[in-house]
Each structure stands twice: as C-alpha cells, then as structure tokens.
Amino acid sequence: MGILICPVCREKLDVSGKNFICTNRHSFDISRSGYVNLLLSKHTGKTIHGDNKLMVNSRRDFLKKGFYAPLREAICENIKSGIILDAGCGEGYYTSGIKNISPDSEVYGIDISKTAVEMASKTYKNITFAVASVFNIPVADSSSDTLVTVFSPYCSNEFQRVLKNNGTMLMAIPSVNHLWELKQAVYDTPYRNDVRPYELDGFQFICTKRINYQFLLSSNQDIQSLFSMTPYYYRTGKSQQEKLFQLENLEVTADFELLEYKKLL
C-alpha cells in the first residue's frame, strides 16, 4: 500500500527500482541501508539535523542491554494491528518492538537524524524508515491507525493530519522522578521533571500508565552511555561531567508515563 508522500508536491510516492518517485517525477534515492531521505533542508536551514553520532551510539549501547525494556513492553501491549507510524523513531529500538508484536502491520519510522535512521535501517529490514521532520511528516492525510511518539517533539497539526479519525496516539514522556539519581550525581541542585497537563487540542485523552522501576548501571561505560544519550550531556560543564567518571556503578530510577489519546472527529 504505502503511505509516504513527496515532500515537494505532496503526491503519493511509489517504489521504482532503487528510488521513491511521485507522479510529478520527483525522485528520492533508497540508500544502501534501505532508508529514504525525505527531509528538505529548506524547512530547517541546517545541514546537520537531530541527534548526532555520539548520542545515537550511546542510546544504542544503552538500550540493547534492556534497561528500558519495560517501557518498550508497555508500548507494545497497547499496539493494535494496522498502519503504524513511529514519529521520532531514533535508531529503531521501540519501532522494532512494535513490528515484532504486530508482524502483519505496516510499520514506518521517521526521524530527523540521518545517523539514527541509517542505523535503524541497517538493523531492522522489515520496517520502512525515512529521514524526515515531525513538523513536516511525508505521510498521507488520515493514513495511520496508530502514531507512536517516544520522548520526541510534539506537533499537534501534523499528528492530527496523519492519523485516521479515531486513530490512536501513544505518547511516552519522562515522569517526575526519571533519572533522579543521575541528576544528583551531576548537579549540585538537581530538579525534578515537570509533567504538563495531559489535555491536548484535537485529541481525547484516554488514560495514562505509570512505569516506574530502578535499574543498576554496573559499569562506568553504562553510566556514560546513559548520560551521553540525554540532553543533560550538552547542558553541563566539564567539571560536572567529570563527576560521573568517578562512579563505577549507579542505581537509577526509570519513571515514565505512557499516555493514550484518540483523535477527535
């Protein structure tokens, strides 16, 4: 079937050989890894987008050890078959879990980071991955049964546009105590996370599930991987970062909320 559309003229994209091509003959190469780049640089004004190689590699190394497996399991428990879009898929950890639990579904993953999408497409061959922004999603109107967004930017207009009427949105966000011990180890005056009201325009809030547990990082390498994949890495000075190099283990709280919404008619 296919739900990807041309980012230039918004016409449907079809596969022709090693390209995605629309009826107006706009053509986009399918990379050796299997993904397609549908990000138009004029929409961002940048040449490098999204998470860099350090963040992507750190997240891959951290996630493959299963530290966030309970969150992935909770997301998968709420997945129904159909056309599923992971908006902000990163290196595909959650996207692949969704495909595994619902193998008959059409699953798509988009992310603005070419580095992340390239890694995802090299690893998971049964999912369609594209480099794209959640603020300009190259997906047809009312085409997706479920949209998943995990710690990614929120774009109300685009998420409403691509979802079918009564379509489901699953949104994972950090809750109040997420990574509290990591913050304590780095900052002199750590702060807890703010959780905003659940109501969103254009969506009916259905429910939330709190996923709260502790996990042990038993090596400094794991501690560094977690820290490097978070925004905190880029918001702290060298002296604060060096505190983590002194630690050989750290017990950390994972505290997530998985929010479920329905698109309003």
Image (tube, rainbow, N blue to C red):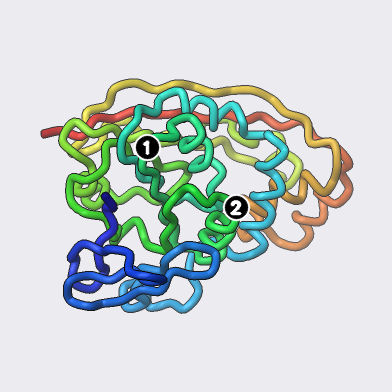
Horizontally, residue 243 falls left or right of residue 117, namely right
Horizontally, residue 50 falls left or right of residue 223, namely left
Residue 104 lies in quadrant: top left
Residue in the image at 35% along x and 48% along y: 154
Residue assigned mark 1: 105
Which quadrant is home to the C terminus? top left
Residue placed furthest toward the left: 265
The residue lying toward the viewer, choosing from 57 and 232, is 57
Q: Position of residue 249 (x, y in %)?
A: 85, 37
* Label number found at residue 82: none
Horizontally, residue 171 falls left or right of residue 141, namely right
Q: Position of residue 73 (x, y in %)?
A: 54, 27
Q: Amino acid at mark 1?
A: Ser
The residue lying toward the viewer, choosing from 120 and 212, is 120
Residue assigned mark 2: 123
Residue 116 lies in quadrant: bottom right
